[in-house]
Image: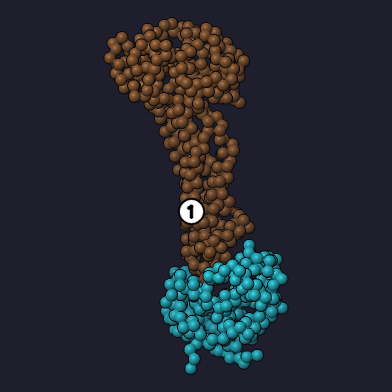
Chain colours: A brown, B cyan
Amino acid sequence: MKEVSSLLLMFLKLFLARPGSGVIIVFGVAGLTAIVTSLFAVSTAFEGALASTGQPDRALLLRAGSTSEINGNVALNQYEIVRDMAGLLRLQDKGVASRETYVTANLRMKNSSKEATLPLRGVEAAAFTVRPEVSIVSGATFDAGKYELIAGVKAAQTFAGLEVGQTIRIRGQEYLVRGHFSAEGGANETELWMDERLLAATLGRGETFSSIIVRLESAREFESFQAQLAADRRLTLSAYRESSFYEDLAGPTTSMIQTLGLLVGIIMSIGALAAGVNSMQAALESRTREIATLRALGFGRVPVLTAVLAECAVLSLIGAGAALVGVFVLLDGQTLSTVAASTTSGTQVAFEFDITGESLAIAGLTALSLGVLGGLMPGIAAIRRPIPQALRG
Amino acid sequence: MTTPFIRCENITHGYFRGGHQLEVLSSLTLSVESGDFVALMGPSGSGKSTLLNLIAGLEKPHAGDITIGGIDITSLDEQTLAAWRAATLGFVFQFYNLIPVLTAHDNVALPLMLTPLSRKERNQRAAAALEIVDLTDRAKHKPTELSGGQQQRVAIARALVTDPRLLVCDEPTGDLDRASATETLQLLKMLNTDFDKTIFMVTHDPEAASYAHTVWHMDKGNLRDRQKRAVA
């Protein structure tokens, strides 16, 4: 151990004295770590944002055959029937349910000339009872019957013109931004909310709306509620447990980000590995005589190789550490947004970039493995070289 | 009759070059007594360095046995041979081969890393070795801050710090001016006489060879003649 640690210290000093192409291993691993950590943090955060939106004791009711709120076209009378059904949480003898109209709006993103799409959700007062996690964090809520809206905090961070008190034009209509709301990190924070009946009227939807969100007495009530819904011939609705609905929604985008992360990670790993092998080869070439001298003095092959690998590991961890600090300082807590693909309307979902312990561990282990692998072949070549030949340099 | 300290018996060795086996040493036999100071001379390509590498355990002969201090080093595996070198040999190279990022003291202490000595004991030994070569005041200097002669003295201190019985010197004055070469040779002579080190030195320099008790001449892989000198 003393032998290896003294060699490692010496090799690190030699590296500092002649960094040469050896720094490539640090930069290669740093680049790889930064990109892979960022991609995995994005997927984790995206999944988390959608997953935290769905609650198991809430159900989303859509027109039968419809798979998303944007395609919903539910008649008003269905709402009254649903509110009287058993299994719903009741307040003042009425089931807690929110009738909602869901469309999209295009707004310009902050610090960009580009427009992106976000959900514009028409809700009634019950929406706050159905979703107790939603609360006004600045300003006030909209007044029913007025062209006013409230913006989710992430929508306000991502899109321009959503400051409280500002007026913004959406679909040809001016709206006053009355307040901002939070939803404990859920996807609703990327939405705009306004009065449901006013939105339906503005859109010319008449006596229809997009979906109903109901709050059940408990998560266990879902199956019986679903059966009740199917049995009632007056209703043409399908019920989805809200948590499952959002998990399904997150699935394709999360897998896409994870697949992309994996692909980029593999490609960059190959690149970083090749760079690592080359840079360590060059670094060890420049130390041919020193290594031969050490071996002539009696240092064994195994301790020399171990010290070379330990040096690679240290350099890789320095690269990974620098990258993680950079990523953490630049991105942790930043609000990012992405398009939720597949079954959704293709709207923007914003979420907070979150570097988890798991992604740190994955990045650290990847860097460590790459460093050690990168040093293995050059290290073996260095210790296999005949000492007399190597002593001549 | 005493057993020689170094005994090379029918050594044959060569290299594979340009698709052909080139024989460098051919059935060479050599004995060196303990405490001797041997100079091995000869033209380039005569096999001097090859013989030195074999005696130092840096290479293994294709045929023959080499026994040093009663140990047949040709039968040792790689790991045991490395440990044997650490315990038995001190190296002095033509170009000093000091580690550039280490101080003179740390260079000298380097072989002690292979011993069970404590840090304090290692420091004491390294300081004592530097004192023998009269470089105590340069202990904290790095090789680039020392002259060629001083660097070679640091290398000699490194060679003797483990108190080996044998010093193997490959052209130790080949890169030095005359004054530094004389200093180095006097130091080696002192180590031979005062510290009873057996010295095996390869050199082109007749002046260097004049410090040795035994001078062998080599040509085309064979030892041609031996001159014994009286101890000065």
As drawn, the residue found furthest toward the front would be A92
Q: Residues within 10 Å of mark 1 (few under 14, many from 20)?
A: many
Residue A153 visible here: yes
Q: Position of residue B44 (x, y in %)?
A: 57, 77
Chain of the residue where label 1 is placed in the rendered structure: A
**Between A197 and B37, the one nearer to me in the picture:** A197
Q: Position of residue A115 (x, y in %)?
A: 55, 21
**Between B104 and A391, the one nearer to me in the picture:** B104
Identify which residue is drawn at 63% across, 62% down.
Answer: B101
Identify which residue is drawn at 48% across, 6% down.
Answer: A201
Q: Position of residue A77 (x, y in %)?
A: 37, 7
Q: Is residue A23 left or right of residue A212?
A: right
- The residue beneath circle 1 is A372
Identify which residue is drawn at 52% across, 53% down.
Answer: A313
Q: Position of residue A64 (x, y in %)?
A: 33, 16
- Residue type at mark 1 is Val
Residue B110 visible here: no
